[in-house]
Amino acid sequence: MAAALLPETASRLLTPETLRTAAKQSQGIHRVPISLRRAIKRYLRGNSPTHPSLPPTTCSTNCSALTLHGCRRARADQDKTHMHRKVLLLSSSFERAKGTGAELAAASTRSALLDDPHAPASAEQRTARWKVQSSYGDTGLLYREDETVAYVASRMPAIYAACHRVLREVRRRSPGFAPKNVLDFGAGPSSALWAMRAVWPKSIERVNLIEPSKEMQRAGQTLLDNLKGLPLIHSYDSIQELNRSIEKHERRHDLVISSYALGEIPSLNDRITIVRQLWDLTRDVLVLLEPGTPQGSKIISQMRSYILWMEKRKCRKSEKSTAAAPSKMKSMVLQEDLLKDGAFVVAPCPHDGRCPLENSDKYCHFVQRLERTSSQRIYKRSKGVPLRGFEDEKFCYVALRRGKRPEEAWPLDGMKFDTLKERHAKRNPEDLIIDYDDQFPSEEDEEAPGSDEDSLVPYASDTQELSLFHESGEEEEEPIRADLGGGWGRIIYSPIRRGRQVQMDVCRATKRDASEGAFERVVVTQSKNPALHLQARKSLWGDLWPF
C-alpha cells in the first residue's frame, strides 16, 4: 500500500502507470442513478400543481370540443409552465441570497475571522454569537412547498453529482475509512445521503439529518420511500435539538457533511459558530461543500483556516500541559490526548498552510459534468438556445480529518525518468520494424464505437441500469492510491496543451510536513520527461500531480 512506503522503497513499487492511476481523481460525465431518477419522477408526479382552469380528472361541458387526451395534454402544458416559473423564482432567490452573503463577506476581515471565540466579551455579544438556532432558522432559506418541488426538479441531481464526486475522493484518499454514523447538516431533500449510500453502500448504519425546513424534510422522506436496505434515519430541525435528543457519548459522528448550506447563512459569526459545532460533532472526517463561486470559495477558505487554526491552538496548549506535567503517568496520558488533537486537509488542498490564492484574483473551485435528468430537461429553460443534454456543476469543498497528517514518502522519491533522447537510445532494433497490418484499421476497428469520456453519454433506458440501493456499482480497488502525505499537488483549472508541452497550475506543499504551500505553474515537455508528459496530457482539472 502506498501509504506505508518508505523513501527507499517507493521507487520499487511506484511506476509511471501507477502514478497515473493514483493521480486520477476527476470523473467524466456523471449519470444520476436510476433509483434517484425514478424517485424524483414519483415525487414530481405526486406534487404537480392543480390548475382551476382545467378539470382534475375528466373533461366538463366547457371542454366538449376537446378530447380527453387533449385536455390532459393542455393540463400538462400548464403544469410545465407553472414549474418553469417556480424554477426561475427559485433561481432568483438564490441570487438574492448570494448578493447578501457577498456584501457581508466583503465587509469581514481576516482578523475578525480569527477572533478567539473564548475572548472576554459582554454577555449580550456572547448570546448573539452563540444563538445558533434562531440565527440559522431566521437567515437560512426556509423553502415553501412550491420552492421545494422546483429545487428537487432542477437542483437536486447536480448537488448529488457534486457530493458524489467529493465523497468518492475521500474514499479513494482514505481507503480504510468506512463511516457508520453520519451527520448531514442542511440536508435539504437528502441529496448528500444518496451520494453517501452510493460511495459507502454497506458501512453506513445510522444517519442524522439537520434541516430547518419542514417541506425539505418531507421531500427527503418521500424520495426515500419504498427503498430497501436503508440505514436508520432521524431528522432534526437544529443542532440544539440533535444534542437534546442524543446522549453525549453518541453525539460524535464518523462523517459530518454540510453541502450548500453555509452560504445561506449571511453572518460570518454564525457560520464560524456552526462550523465549530459541526467539528465538535465530528469523530473523523468533516466535509464542507459550497457552490463554485468566489463567495463559496471564500466561505470554504475561511472555515478551513478557522478549523486548522483552532486545532493548532489546542495542540500548543496540550504541549504546554505535557511539558508542565509533574508525573510520568500524567505525561503519558497527555501524550495520548496530544495524538488525538490536530487536523489536516484530506482534499483538495495538499497542505495545511495558508491558502496561496487567498489574496489573489483567482479562487479555488472544481467542476463536475452530469447528464441532465428528464426533469431537468423539461423544467430548465434556456434563453433561445436548445438545452444541452448535460450541465457543469461548479463547486468548492474541503475535507478535514482529525489527527496528524501521516508522514509519507513523496511519490517521485528515488524515481529516475529518461529523457526522450535517452529513451530512443535504449530502443531495441525490433521496435523499429514497421508492421504494415497495424497501420490500417480493420473492419472491426472501424465499427467499434469511440470511448471518449468527455463526450455526451446517451440517455440509457431505465431497465438497463442497476438500482443504487440494491446492487453496488463500486469500482475495482486500484493497488496504488495517492497517499495523504505532502507529495501530491492539486491541478487547479484546466491544463493548457501547446504542442509538445503541457502547462498546469498546481497547488502544492513546499515542506515535507505539508505545513506550507504554494501555487505555481508546472511546465512538462516531452523531450525532458516523456513519461510525465504522457501523464500531464491525460490529466484533467482536479487531478493530483506528483512531486
Image (tube, helix red, strand yellow):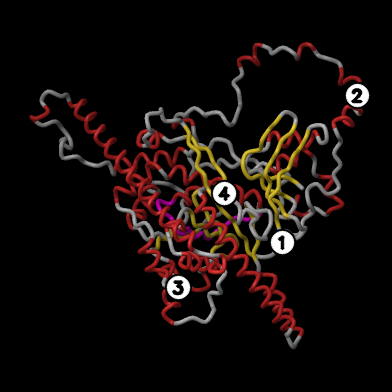
Tell me which corner region of the image, top left, top right, bottom left or bottom right, holds residue 203: bottom right
Whole-percent x, y for residue 240 in the image: 42, 70
Residue denoted by label 1? 515
Q: Residue at x 21, y 26 (%)?
A: 69
**Secondary structure type for disc 2:** loop
Percent x, y for residue 532?
A: 77, 37
Crowding at label 4, few (<14), some or many (≥20) Cα neighbours within 10 Å?
Answer: many
Of the two numbered discs 3 and 2 in the rendering, the one whose residue sits closer to the viewer: 3
- Asked whether residue 182 is drawn in magenta, I would say yes
- Give the magenta-colored segment's residue range: 176-190
Q: Which of 191 and 251 is in front in this view?
A: 191
* Mark earlier in primary sequence (4, 1): 4
Q: Main secondary structure of the magenta part?
A: loop
**Disc 3 residue crowd, few under 14, some 14–19, many 20+, Cα 10 Å:** some
Q: How far apart are marks 3 and 2 (CA)?
A: 72 Å
Residue underneath mark 3: 129
Q: Tell me the CA gap for discs 2 and 1.
A: 46 Å
Q: Mark 2 points at which residue?
A: 428
User: Label 4 amino acid?
Assistant: Val
Mark 3 vs mark 4, CA separation in Å: 30 Å
Q: Residue 166 carries which label?
A: 4
Q: Earlier in the sequence, mark 1 or mark 3?
A: 3
> Is disc 4 placed on a helix, strand or loop?
helix
Q: Position of residue 195 (x, y in %)?
A: 51, 48
Q: Quadrant of residue 103?
A: bottom left
In terms of secondary structure, where does tag 3 sit? Answer: helix
Q: Cα distance, mark 4 to mark 1? A: 23 Å
Count residues near mark 1 (Cα–Cα under 10 Å), then give few for <14, some for 14-19, many for 20+.
Answer: some
Vertical placement of 231 versus 69: above or below?
A: below
Disc 1 element? loop
Q: Nearer the viewer, mark 3 or mark 4?
A: 3
Looking at the image, tell me whether mark 3 or mark 4 is earlier in sequence order: 3
